[in-house]
Image (spheres, rainbow, N blue to C red):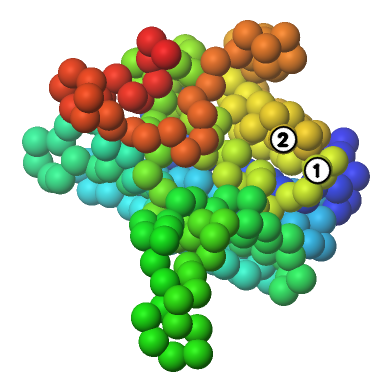
Amino acid sequence: MRSLPDRSMKLIVTSPPYNIGKAYERRSTLEQYIQQQTQVIAECVRLLHPNGSICWQVGNHVHNGEIVPLDIPLYQSFKNHGLKLRNRIVWHFEHGLHCSKRLSGRYETINWFTKGDDYTFNLDAIRVPSKYPGKRYFKGPKRGQLSCNPRGKNPGDVWVIPNVKNNHIEKTLHPCQFPVELVERLVLALTEAGDNVLDPYVGVGSAVIAAIKHDRIGYGCDIMQEYIDLAWERVHQLRTGSLRTRPMGKPIYDPAKPYGGHRELGIDE
């Protein structure tokens, strides 16, 4: 990251380690973890374009059965740099580990920060179908006119997107892989064509793939060479048209399919 120029990234989107002992991280105390994250955040702020956004996707740190929602202790690290929190997006998924002594976790958060008040936000690029697309005003001066935006509605701050488990078409050896469609929505909303997108914990390259798919320029770094090799392989597959990704906006369930359509998570298209 130090080799990249100041203010060069329109979007920095990432999912850092959660300090829970995965193969790609060295577990430390929560205080040490926050200190390490603060150093990375400082470098991200240096790289962030004045009209840019940082999207930090985190879950829970777990210690002796107690959870710590990581976006809470990390919030002040962003505020110390003068960044403003625009949304705390809930990413909801319906598959994951099953807990026996507490409720099973089925969501994580994406904290969207901007450097200033003049930031890129393309709502029309991420609108979703309206629940009642033909609804009209029934009285008043607009009677008979459409009461909803014909281009769709704001997707809100709760996003239901499958996480990448073994039956997902994007699954690689990475144990905590970003779904491409999650990043695609952020890329479309917070950047323009030709902008730079950085993932400082790039893993197997899902953020870079999301950027390239929409004519942005993707950057990433990681300390795990096997992940970098996989990321390059996936980028090459994207360029040749052989990379399979779950389409944006695809229904999660299909009642016409067996078992309530759970195969809609992305396999056997």
Q: Position of 209 compared to 57: left or right?
A: right
**Quarter holding the N terminus?**
top right
**141 and 90: which is toward the camera:** 141
Tell me the SS state at disc 1: loop
Q: Residues within 10 Å of mark 1 (few under 14, many from 20)?
A: few
Residue 183 vs 35, above or below: the answer is above
Q: Amino acid at mark 2?
A: His
**42 and 237: which is toward the camera:** 237
Please tell me in which quadrant of the rendered image residue 265 appears.
top left
Q: Amino acid at mark 1?
A: Ala
Q: Which residue: 41% across, 49% down?
A: 159
Tell me the tag on residue 193.
1
Residue 245 vs 109, above or below: the answer is above
Tell me the SS state at disc 2: loop
Q: Which residue: 63% across, 57% down?
A: 124
Question: Percent from the top left, x then y, of residue 117?
Answer: 72, 74
Residue 141: tell me if it is visible. yes
Question: Percent from the top left, x then y, of residue 199?
Answer: 67, 37
Q: Which residue: 72% across, 9% down?
A: 240
Q: Residues within 10 Å of mark 2 (few under 14, many from 20)?
A: some
Q: Residue furthest bottom?
A: 140
Residue 31: tell me if it is visible. no
> Are the residues at dot 2 and dot 1 in contact (C-beta closer than 8 Å)?
yes
Q: Residue furthest left?
A: 100
Question: Percent from the top left, x then y, of residue 146?
Answer: 48, 70
Q: Position of 71 compared to 200: left or right?
A: left
Q: How far apart are the two marked residues, 2 and 1, measured between alpha carbons?
A: 7 Å
Residue 215 vs 192, above or below: the answer is above
Residue under numbered circle 2: 214
